[in-house]
């Protein structure tokens, strides 16, 4: 499987997309599994010696890297079907995360805390730069030290030792997703009661908590920013199904609206979509939600008229930690707004490199300016024109370029498409099923 995955990845590195404007997108589509969920569920399997079976697992490069790391630690996995894997960590006997794989996969840090629980020690290379920004580790490390983990940093590596682990109250400096999820993985097997104040509560964090509860963990407040975790001395195996990706749901809503299409999205995790649907409405894009069937319908006729505030100011769309508008979806909304009448300001305070993809949007006549590293302003409806563009290293920025190409008059070429496959492994087939004219060529 890994060899096949490698050759497929190599093919994507050398390939590009050819997208020709055609008929509006129509029909029914199912979103991909949540990438940010599965890459946390795999390390969680280290907390038990029993089998963990995970359904709805995407075949992405990120999943491939995480499975390789598991194998390097002497854990095992088996693919039971096209989207189901069985994990077993009973043979894990190393506390060092592979250096080469760690450099490829930043989420490898999620293995630290299960290893600390199992081995009493965990080590990995010091993380290098991140394409999203500086992303300092100080708060993350400080939270672990509050739990009694002894931090070490030498020879280009950093790690932790189980010095005197004890549940405690942790007031997180910021609602970091990775920081919260690491605390959860440590706290479920740390004696005492751990309270996390200002915890992250994104859908993928909830998915991790819910799977751990199915394994016997005791976690309260899963839907909130206040988590209470009571120690258990043993976790058992489980079967779990990864939730759909809420970002993919939003992406299909945007694609339908931008092409004048009409689609139904199934398995739409509607409880997670409220604020995103409200934001689409402010851009003049209406949806019909069926919570019982878990579907979202996007009608063909949309005003695509951006609202102004009560004081007649420009609409300000802010990306903030959940339960506010997700930071990873801001690119999708900005590109969608460029297909709407009116202007809006889009702000992402989390990452300082988020908006650099506007240079590629400009090639397609996107009417936007970058006010500063955290803000852009969109102007009136863009008459999208086909262009030869290059994907960003940021997955969601690349997805924004894909949306623009689907709405652009003519035939667009998108180069360096590898980032798209990290989160959306079958996006080409998905858009083809909706009527898009999209091809991958070398």
Image (cartoon, helix red, strand yellow):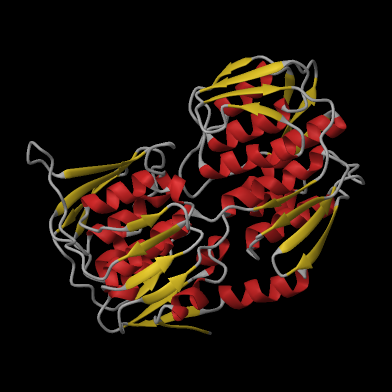
Q: Nearer the viewer, residue 337 or 365?
A: 337
Residue 251 in view: yes
Whether residue 157 is visible, yes or no, is no
Q: From what the image shows, is residue 339 above or below residue 220? A: below
Q: Position of residue 416 (x, y in %)?
A: 49, 71
Outermost residue on the front side: it is 292
In the rendering, at what x and y percent does residue 427 appear? Answer: 50, 71
Residue drawn at (72%, 29%), measured in percent from left and top?
186
Q: Where residue 357 sits: x, y (%)?
A: 35, 59
Relative side of 175 to 289, left or right: right
x, y percent for residue 381: 16, 64
Taking the spot 76% from the left edge, 38% from the top edge, the residue there is 215
* Image quadrant in which the N terminus is located: bottom right
The relative height of residue 194 versus residue 9 in the rendered view (above or below) is: above
Question: Foreground: 423 or 152?
Answer: 423
**Residue 286 picture quarter:** bottom left
How many numbered discs sit on the rendered protein? 0
Residue 291 lies left or right of residue 89; in this view the side is: left
Please tell me in which quadrant of the rendered image residue 409 appears: bottom left
- The quarter holding residue 312 reads top left
Q: Residue at x 29, y 47 (%)?
A: 278
Relative to 312, say whether 338 is above or below: below
Taking 417 as reference, is 35 above or below it?
above
Left or right of residue 228: residue 292:
left
Q: Nearer the viewer, residue 382 or 355?
A: 382
């Amino acid at each position: 499987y890994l060899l096949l995955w490698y050759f497929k990845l190599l093919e994507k590195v050398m390939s590009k997309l050819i997208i020709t404007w055609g008929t509006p997108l129509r029909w029914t589509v199912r979103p991909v599994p949540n990438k940010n969920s599965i890459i946390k569920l795999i390390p969680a399997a280290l907390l038990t010696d029993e089998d963990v079976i995970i359904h709805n697992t995407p075949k992405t490069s990120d999943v491939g890297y995480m499975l390789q790391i598991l194998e390097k630690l002497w854990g095992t996995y088996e693919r039971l079907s096209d989207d189901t894997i069985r994990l077993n960590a009973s043979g894990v006997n190393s506390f060092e995360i592979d250096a080469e794989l760690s450099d490829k996969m930043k989420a490898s840090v999620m293995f630290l805390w299960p290893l600390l629980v199992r081995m009493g020690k965990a080590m990995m290379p010091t993380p290098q730069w991140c394409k999203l920004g500086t992303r300092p580790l100080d708060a993350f490390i400080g939270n672990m030290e509050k739990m009694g983990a002894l931090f070490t940093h030498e020879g280009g590596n950093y790690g932790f030792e189980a010095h005197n682990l004890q549940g405690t109250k942790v007031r997180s400096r910021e609602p970091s997703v990775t920081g919260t999820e690491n605390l959860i993985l440590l706290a479920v097997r740390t004696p005492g009661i751990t309270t996390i104040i200002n915890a992250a509560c994104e859908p993928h964090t909830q998915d991790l908590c819910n799977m751990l509860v199915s394994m016997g963990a005791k976690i309260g407040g899963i839907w909130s920013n206040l988590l209470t975790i009571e120690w258990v001395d043993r976790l058992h195996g489980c079967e779990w199904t990864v939730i759909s990706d809420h970002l993919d749901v939003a992406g299909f809503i945007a694609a339908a609206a931008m092409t004048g299409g009409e689609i139904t999205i199934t398995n739409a995790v509607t409880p997670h979509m409220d604020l995103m649907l409200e934001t689409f409405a402010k851009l003049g894009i209406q949806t019909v939600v069926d919570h019982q069937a878990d579907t979202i319908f996007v009608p063909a006729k949309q005003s695509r008229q951006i609202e102004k505030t009560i004081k007649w100011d420009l609409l300000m769309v802010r990306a903030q930690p959940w339960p506010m508008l997700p930071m990873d979806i801001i690119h999708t909304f900005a590109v969608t707004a460029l297909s709407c009448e009116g202007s809006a300001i889009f702000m992402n305070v989390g990452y300082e490199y988020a908006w650099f993809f506007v240079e590629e949007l400009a090639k397609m006549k996107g009417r936007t300016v970058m006010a500063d590293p955290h803000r852009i302003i969109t102007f009136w409806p863009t008459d999208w024109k086909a262009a030869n563009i290059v994907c960003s290293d940021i997955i969601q920025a690349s997805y924004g370029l894909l949306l623009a190409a689907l709405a652009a008059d003519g035939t667009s070429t998108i180069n360096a498409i590898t980032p798209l496959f990290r989160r959306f492994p079958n996006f080409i087939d998905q858009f083809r099923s909706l009527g898009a004219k999209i091809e991958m060529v070398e």
